[in-house]
Image (cartoon, rainbow, N blue to C red):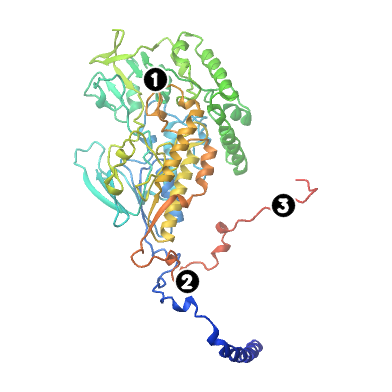
Amino acid sequence: MSAIQSSLNGQATATDDNTKTASATNNRDASKLPISSHEEAPASTFKLGDFQIDDPNARPMKVIIIGTGFSGIAAGIRFRQRIPGVEMVIYEKSEAVGGTWFSNRYPGLACDIPSHCYQYTFTNKTDWSSFYAPGPEILAYLNSVVSQYDLDPYIKLRHEMVGAWFDEATGKWRIHGASEGEHMPSNSEEEWEEFEDIGDLLFTGIGGLSRAQWDVRSGSNEGKESRGIGLTEPEKKLNNGWEEDVKDWGGKKIAVIGVGSSAIQIVPALQPKVAKLYNYVRGKTWLAVPFGSDKMAGLLGRNTEEQNYAFSEEEKKSFQDPAYYKQFRHALEEDLNSSHQAILRGTPMQMGAREVFKANMLKRLAKKPWIADHLVPDFGVACRRLTPGPGYLEALCEDNVDFIPTNIKRVTETGIETVDGKHQDLDVIICATGYDTSFKFPFPIVGRNGIDIRTKWSPHPKTYLAMCVDGFPNWFFSLGPNSGVGSGSLLTLIEKQVDYAVQVAMKMKRERLKSVEAKREAVEDYDEYIEQYFPTTVYSEKCRSWYKMGKEEGRVVGLWPGSTLQALRVLQCPRWEDFDYERIDDDKTKNRFYYLGDGMTFPEKTGAGSRAWYLDDDHINIPPVPMRAGTIS
């Protein structure tokens, strides 16, 4: 230590001598030097902040999440994981978590992509019972994820948002809702209580398949009160006890209205359990060869003709090997993401799909070939939502099923009358007529200048990358307009939308931002891209689809304008230049670097936390060693 000090003293002596010489020279010429502009500038009034850049308490953040489907649950996990000290609440209108997988309980409910592709990337379930997971298993999976990540303390059940207003002065969202009480019986006659909450960021995972669309016959309102199930006994309604009620339907005549994904699952589920089933169909649709079935069969050595086979105990056991299961799932998802070109107009893959699917449908309708004339479409494959529909065509060919392609005139007290004047007496009418996919919410979401999103999104929604909208700062959403996928994995897209919103919240907290808002020109540019993209696809062909808000022609609002893989790349890295920002400290200073604080980090200031965090596993990115020339891998 003394040697170092002596060396420093020696350097100081030499420096002093040099300084004296330089000073004498400068004094002789000082009068010749110009006055610098720096000397004329007024003294800065800027003061450092008395906080640290990573102080978890310096910029408090409260996140309000709406919904506990796949989106809301993922959001609850990621916001809590990545934002230290975040305050978070998740509101769910139903009596349990699960979103659409809780609210839908109809017979035959199942996923229509391979089970192993319909789960989070970070939480695997290896014991799915079958190729297409039944609804109750998916609901159980979601409940297990909630339990695994301890989200229950943050979830408020039976709390329904009835409106949201952005406060421009504070940069916060004010939520109004109605609460029934989490422990109150679902059939309770107690009045709902109003509640209010305020948060810095609003994340909605409402989804487009949550509000029933009644379309039995224009002008007919009969039976609508039964929420998808109209009964000839108006006082009797099915709540959630489908299976119990179906047990007593052995002697009943049942009608199923529709030929969408739900109807295609309900018909084969009910056909063997009822006396007579009538399927009323007004449109046409493609039924696909089961997605990923050939790949699955090849991986497991199974029969490719099976439409929805059950996994054996031996197969489930093999999935418990992490290395094998990772390879297995990777192969399935790669196959699932390989069909995007089939939705592009005129491509060999699109034309080939039409041939294969038509041949498959005709084969499965061999007992009643006339049905194909009313069911096989003229429009391209995937213009309407594509589903494999295991067992549907076979059910239509059974003796106790009548396929009725005649339009419905009205629903009567005893059955259904079609436009040709025929009337069919019925015991039960199931209206599988879809959902309201117009994104016109039944409640106000009000942004800047008092603009309601329902007004903003008329005649159709415009968004920034399907996640937010100008004029509505600090509001981000998943599965909003143009968020669905025509091929590939939907859940990976949900995860990326959640990740994007979390990155925004992290930026707000780190940089002490009051608001983050998409620029209007960015929204308009994205809208222009959408308008140019969809005419290249079969989605723009004439067919009635929820992709187009239930219309035959018009704007596509249900799908992402590109492939799933392209969406993941787009959402991977935020374009921060597409946003406008307000800082919470604008009244103190205009210096953009005020958020740097006092120059220290929280662990340095307080002694709490790691001061070598950059060596933690989650911060180290070890690059692969390049292979040298001539090396055999």
- Asked if residue 388 lies left or right of residue 98, the reply is right
Sequence-earlier tag: 2 or 3:
2
Secondary structure under the numbered disc 3 in the rendered image:
loop
Crowding at mark 1 (Cα within 10 Å: few <14, some 14-19, many 20+): many
Determine which residue is flagged by label 2: 599
Q: Of discs 2 and 3, which sits in the foreground? A: 2
Q: Residues within 10 Å of mark 2 (few under 14, many from 20)?
A: some
Q: Are marks 1 and 3 in contact (CB under 8 Å)?
A: no
Residue 94 visible here: no
Q: Residues within 10 Å of mark 3 (few under 14, many from 20)?
A: few
Residue 50 image-quadrant placement: bottom left
Disc 2 is placed on an element classified as: loop
Residue hosting label 3: 626
Image quarter in which the N terminus is found: bottom right
Which of the two marks, 2 or 1, is nearer to us in this view? 2
Q: Is residue 365 above or below residue 446?
A: above
Q: CA distance from mark 2 to mark 1?
A: 68 Å
Answer with the quarter of the image where residue 267 lies: top left
At x 43% / y 36%, what residue is drawn? 482
Between the C-alphas of marks 1 and 3, the distance is 59 Å
Q: Which residue is mark 1?
A: 270
- Sequence-first disc among 2 and 1: 1
Q: Quadrant of residue 139?
A: top left
Q: Amino acid at mark 1?
A: Leu
